[in-house]
Image (cartoon, rainbow, N blue to C red):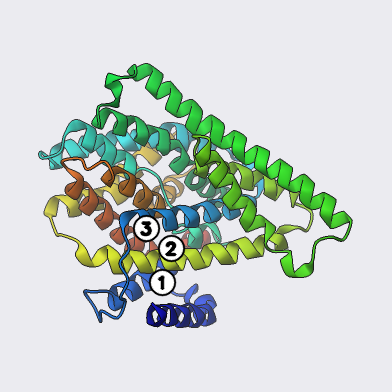
Amino acid sequence: MYTDLAIIAAFVFLYSLVAGRLDKTPSSGAIVFVGFGLLCGPQGLDVFDYKVDGEGIRILAELTLSLVLFTDAANANLNVLRLSFRIPERLLFVGLPLTIVLGFAVGLLLFDGLSLIEIALLATILAPTDAALGEAVIANKAVPSHIREGLNVESGLNDGICVPILLIFLAFAVGATETQAPVTLIVHHFVAGIGIGAASGIACSLLAGYLFSFAYRRGWVSSAWLEVPVPALALACFATAQQLGGSGFIACFVGGLLTGWMLRRGGKTLLLGAEAVGNTLALLTWVVFGTAVVGHLAFTWQAIVYAVLSLTAIRMLPVVVCLSGTGLRLPDKLFLGWFGPRGLASIVFIVIVLGERLPGAETLKHTVVWTVILSVLAHGLSATPLARRYGAGGPNGG
């Protein structure tokens, strides 16, 4: 255990020294992390001695995603978002359902060994985009602000919206509808997932904001602890919503938006601690993913074809369609469509589904993991050069 800890600690230290330089290259952090995990795992040098089960990966990915969603939302430019909310609105309420439907249709053509519900689960698992993998684009000032904020809000909310859809399909898959009417089940999951999630994020953030302001004005907050409250608040939003039956991801994004608004006057430095913790957890998640998952993949042509289509046609066609009439040019729509990376949310979702031991579980797992791997490579390598080229082209949509 101590050998593994020493290797990972050394890697984190070395990466932190060159992270700024690597941000200017086509290679993303996720590529480096997954590659390092694969190199040190059983299929590589076999220096890592630990075993990580699905539940461990799920918890790590959930905590990472909660912090990333919270800090991304807190850093959002609400003035820009207020003027161009139609982009994420169309992407979430038109593009997302179309993506699931198109993913289901493609799955029907490719996977004759999966049931209809299992194909619907696959389409839902791979519908949400990843805020962490999209950070290279969202943080790139070369990309117009309305495009960046649109992608940020979409990636922040679509995984939370997909949670109740996933749970509904999963309930059908395991026969839960035999004891509960389908309509009741659907309404319950959507109201609980989105409503309780949003309410939890708002309540936790308002209470935390009041308590922090009260203590700070009286000089009770030590400078050594100044960066601790925000990551603690992010985790509190997530855990509270999950415990109450809501979506922790919705709670974190909504809570982050509210916290960012409360910190709008020079308080954004308080987010640095949460960003650092989120970056470290993301590194660990991708290293574990490379070590425990990537090295054990099976190769099937159906999984590869679906993965490629999931990152291209299944994502990009609905985006182009849903943004019709918004005034955005075709290059703007294609840019928004391409940068829909799959990552942490899909990992969390597939672990949830695997826990139910469905007949097609192995096919689902391999397809999802291949999609995430290809996304890490394709979006990681293309983020910086395409963002620079897109920004230089001067798109004027919005």
Q: Residue at x 72, y 41 (%)?
A: 206
Q: Secondary structure at mark 2?
A: helix
Q: Is residue 33 above or below residue 67?
A: below
Residue 26's label in the rendered image is 1
Sequence-first tag of 1 and 2: 1
Q: Which residue is mark 3?
A: 57
- As rendered, which of 334 and 179 lies closer to the eye? 179
Identify residue type, mark 3.
Ile
Q: To which quarter of the image does residue 139 belong?
A: bottom right
Q: Is residue 297 above or below residue 122?
A: below
Identify residue type, mark 1.
Pro
Residue 383's label in the rendered image is 2
Q: Residue at x 38, y 52 (%)?
A: 338
Question: Can residue 78 be seen?
Answer: yes
Mark 3 or mark 1, whichever is nearer to me: 3
**Is disc 2 surrounded by few (<14), some (14 to 19) or many (20+) residues within 10 Å?**
many
Give the Cα separation between the discs numbered 3 and 1. Answer: 27 Å
Q: Residue at x 43, y 52 (%)?
A: 130
